Amino acid sequence: LGYLPQDFGYYPEFTGQDFLLYMSALKGLEKSYAKRKAKEVLESNVLGEIHHIKCHFSHYHPDASASYHGKLEHPLLSDVTIHHMDTARFLSGENPVRVWCREEAAEYCWYGKRPASATLITEMSSNIRFLYDGTLAAPVSTTDWNADWDIECDNGVLQIRPERIIVHRAMGDDGDAVVEEIKVDGIEADSRIASLREACMAIREGRKGETDYEDNLKTFEWMEKAIESSGIQDWITI
């Protein structure tokens, strides 16, 4: 049971651009506190330049045949992977150059012939390679919706896991490392709150928001090219 008022709430001091910025933060591609913290570590250059970004997503999705998700032709890529793509762009500060993708149907579950699993390789600017494997048809969930991340750099590896960031900093040439764990919990872990705070700061500072809708279009194009690549089983330039 829901209630839809006749008068829709709106902040009267917002310009049209302010409102689009605000809505893009609330409804767009969110950046959690953990991802922001990870970006701070990467930008500090303590780990050096990024070489590979590896993202693993394995989730069980209950039957959603009656919902919008149950009607998507590419449920994984268009409803979940697109957020992971946006995260890869956010963490690296780079954009995709070309992509190869292979989707697989999940006929053993309610998805039927629709592809609920995918493997994806993307060459990004600055010679970064993004490696992705994901599924919505796992028997149980072994990652959360944000996925597990391993970001390999010149001098170590940064891992993003539920509620924590793990930094492995190389010591010498023998493979030894200093390991630091950064816990992420409490109110700051809520990506909606973090996104709203960022949107408000962008308006105050007169700049584009972190989830600016124009920038999000680049991620949508990446996703569309991945679907195209899966159809022809070949590399697609973005």
Image: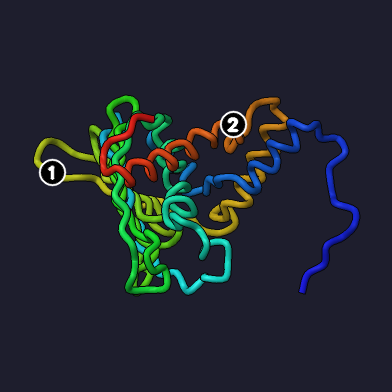
Q: Please tell me which residue is depicted at 37% across the width and 41% down the height of the picture.
A: 228
* Residue 125 image label: none
Residue name at image x 43 percent, y 62 percent: 144
Crowd around label 2: few <14 · some 14–19 · many ≥20 (10 Å):
few
Which residue is found at the position 78% from the left and 70% from the top?
2
> What residue is shown with label 1?
175
168 vs 215: above or below: below
Mark 1 or mark 2, which is nearer the start of the sequence?
Answer: 1
Colour setup of the view: rainbow
The kind of residue on which mark 1 rests is Gly
Disc 2 residue type?
Answer: Glu
How packed is label 1: few (under 14 Cα within 10 Å), some, or many (20 or more)? few
Give coordinates of residue 226: x percent, y percent: 37, 42
Mark 2, secondary structure of its residue: helix
* Residue tagged 2: 214
Image point 29% across, 29% down: which residue? 49
Mark 2–mark 1 CB contact (< 8 Å): no
Disc tally is 2
Of residues 224 and 125, the one nearer the viewer is: 224
Position of 131 with respect to 238 (left or right) is left
Query: Label 2 vs label 1: CA separation?
Result: 42 Å
Place of residue 55 in the rendered image (x, y in percent of width and height, measured from the top left): 33, 49
202 is higher (above) or lower (below) than 119: above
- Dividing the image into 4 quarters, which one contains the N terminus? bottom right
Q: Residue 222 at what x, y percent from top left?
A: 42, 37
In the image as oriented, which residue stretches furthest toward the left? 174
Residue lying at the far right in this picture: please name it: 7
Label 1's element?
loop
Q: Quadrant of residue 198?
A: top right
Is residue 150 at least partly visible in the picture?
A: no
